[in-house]
Image (cartoon, rainbow, N blue to C red):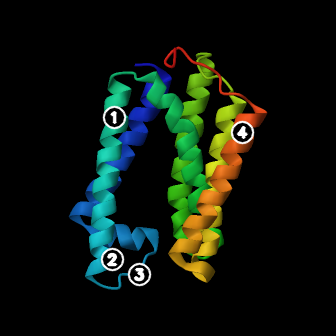
Amino acid sequence: MDVAAFTMLIFGMVIVGSGLTGLLAPHILLTVLGISETGHATQLFIMATSQASLAMGLYYILASLNETRNFFQWSVPLRIINFMVFTSMVAVGVAPSKWLMVAGLEVVGALATAVALASKNNFTFNPFHVLRIVSVTLAIVGAILTFKPFGIYGSASAFLLISSVGMMFAYHRFAPIQTRDQE
């Protein structure tokens, strides 16, 4: 197992641990994250997201054991998006400041995997993909910011508008690079 796979294994084990904690003792996870319990709906939601976390952690573990490098490469920008979204949720007051622990875990894991991948010279910079990821991230932040004043439909509209403009700009600025998988 190389270093990149090892970073994925560790991240997967942390996510599985978080998922199991949320399923078996949701009150502990609520306390750690600084979320006040307002009833069964909160506990149900934390348990449902914990099940998703458990499944995602198992994906990371299986990808690391099978050294699925494409999965490693895609996980880096997606975990950076998670970091930006989670941080913006704290910044706009949607999430408590303890949520920055989750954001920090995402960015540290992403950077560790990125460094490990780059050290093997298997990680290539693709401006088209970078602009796509930035576009989606900005769209999510825009959707979060417009949720309170405009509701779910305004939020969805903001997301679609920002992401569509960003995707069109990315496509026109940098044509997608063909990879071996797409040939």
3 or 4: tag closer to the N-terminus: 3
Mark 4 residue type: Ala
Q: Kindly identify which residue carries mark 1.
A: 61
Q: Quadrant of residue 37?
A: bottom left
Residue 177 location (% of width, % of height): 65, 22
Question: Which tag, 1 or 3, sits closer to the chain's start?
Answer: 3
Amino acid identity at mark 2: Thr
* SS for callout 3: loop
Q: Is mark 1 on a helix, strand or loop?
A: helix
Q: Earlier in the sequence, mark 1 or mark 2?
A: 2
Residue for badge 2:
42
Helix, strand or loop under label 4 = helix
Circles 3 and 4 in contact, beta carbons < 8 Å: no
Q: Which amino acid does label 1 sit on?
A: Ile
Q: In this view, does 175 lie above or below 31?
A: above
Residue 170 in view of the camera: yes
- Give x and y (percent) for residue 10: 41, 37
Question: What whole-number distance in Å separates the C-alpha atoms at marks 3 and 4?
Answer: 41 Å
Q: Distance between the Cα atoms at labels 1 and 4?
A: 33 Å
**154 vs 161: above or below:** below
What is the distance, in whole Å, between disc 3 and disc 2 at their CAs?
A: 8 Å
**Spatial CA span between label 1 and label 3:** 31 Å
> Residue 32 sits in which quadrant?
bottom left
Q: Are marks 2 and 4 in contact (CB under 8 Å)?
A: no
Q: Which residue is drawn at 24% across and 61% down?
A: 23
Q: How crowded is mark 3: few (under 14 residues within 10 Å), some or many (20 or more)?
A: few
Q: Name the residue under label 3.
A: 36
Instruction: Judge the density around disc 2: few (<14), some (14-19), many (≥20) Cα neighbours within 10 Å.
Output: some
Disc nearest the viewer among 1 and 2: 2
Q: Which of marks 1 and 4 is in front?
A: 4
Q: Nearer the viewer, mark 3 or mark 4?
A: 4
Measured Cα–Cα span from mark 1 to mark 2: 28 Å
